[in-house]
Amino acid sequence: MPELPEVEALKDFLTENLVGHELVRVLPVAISVLKTYDPPLSALEGHEVTAVRRYGKFLDIGTDGGLRLVTHLARAGWLHWKDPLPDGLPRPGKGPLALRVALETGAGFDLTEAGTQKRLAVHVVRDPQEVPGVARLGPDPLADDFDEARLAALLAGERRQIKGALRDQSLIAGVGNAYSDEILHAARMSPFKLAASLTPEEVRGLYEALRGTLAEAVERSRGLAAGRLKAEKKTGLRVHGRTGEPCPVCGDTIREVSFSDSSLQYCPTCQTGGKPLADRRLSRLLK
C-alpha cells in the first residue's frame, strides 16, 4: 500500500508534470472506483491543473475550474505515468486499469488496481473536506506544528496497542502497515505495547523514530519517477516484509505475526527483550 512517503513523492512528481497542463480526457474504466457522481468526471475536462496536494494518503489534483480530483490508491492501487498514452480507448473489464487521465500534450497517467478487492477511490469535489476519508484525518506527522507534545496528547488515554494506534488515520495521517513496523523498530518498541502506557522517554523515542523514519523515506523517494517508487520503498525497509532475514541492527532473525488480512514484522532483540511475540489472537508474549 502506498503510504505517506510514496504519496508525497507522487505529489511532487505530479506537480512537476501536471501543473499548467490541460486535462483533455478523464476516462473511468472501472466504474467501481467512482465514489462521487455530481459533478461528473467529464466536468474536469478542458480545465488546467493548478496544484497537487497530499492529505495523508490522499492525492488532490486541483484545477482552475474549482473542481478537484481526489484519489486514494488503497492497498493495491498505483499511478502509472505514460508519455505518450496508448492510442485508442481502453476496454472496460480488461485488466487492472481503473482510470485514465490525458493531457493536451498526449501524456497522462493511468490508475490501476490489482487483485479482487476493489478499494481504489476517486472523487470529484469542490473542497477536499467533502471526501469523508480526508475530513476524518488526524494531523500530518511531518507538519511543522506536529511536535512531541502533540504526539503525547494523541496517545494519552489510547488503550490500543501502539501498532494499531499508529495505523489509525484519524489519529495520525499517512502511516500504514509497513512504516508502522519501521517506526517501531527504530523506536525499539514492541508493536503490542499499549499506547497509553508509554513513558515520556518512550514518547520522545517514538516521536523521533516517527519523524525520522518518514523524513528519511521521503528524501529517498524525492525526484524519482512514479514507476520507481515501489522498488525504492521495498529496498529501504529494514524489517517490514523481511521475515526470516537478519535484523540490520543486531543480526537477530526478523519474525512475523499474522492477522486475517495482514501481518507485522519485528526484531525480538531490538523490540521485545528477546522474546518472540505470540500469535495476534493470543495478544501476549510467549512464556
Image (cartoon, helix red, strand yellow):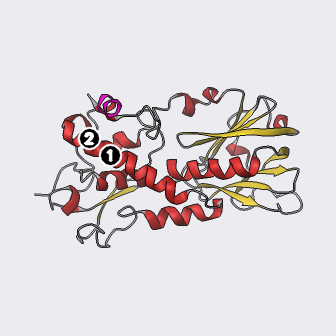
Mark seen at residue 80: none
Q: Residues within 10 Å of mark 2 (few under 14, many from 20)?
A: some
Residue at 16%, 54% in the rendered image: 285
Q: Is residue 80 above or below residue 153?
A: below
The kind of residue tagged 2 is Arg
Q: Is residue 152 magenta?
A: yes
Q: For the residues marked 1 and 2, what is the alpha-carbon distance in whole angstroms?
A: 6 Å
The kind of residue tagged 1 is Glu
Residue range corresponding to the magenta coloring:
149-153
Residue holding disc 2: 204
* Residue 60 in the figure: left or right of residue 50: left
Residue holding disc 1: 208
Q: Position of residue 158 (x, y in %)?
A: 28, 32
Q: Position of residue 37 (x, y in %)?
A: 75, 32
Q: Position of residue 111 (x, y in %)?
A: 69, 53
**Label 1–label 2 contact, CB within 8 A:** yes
Q: Is residue 214 magenta?
A: no
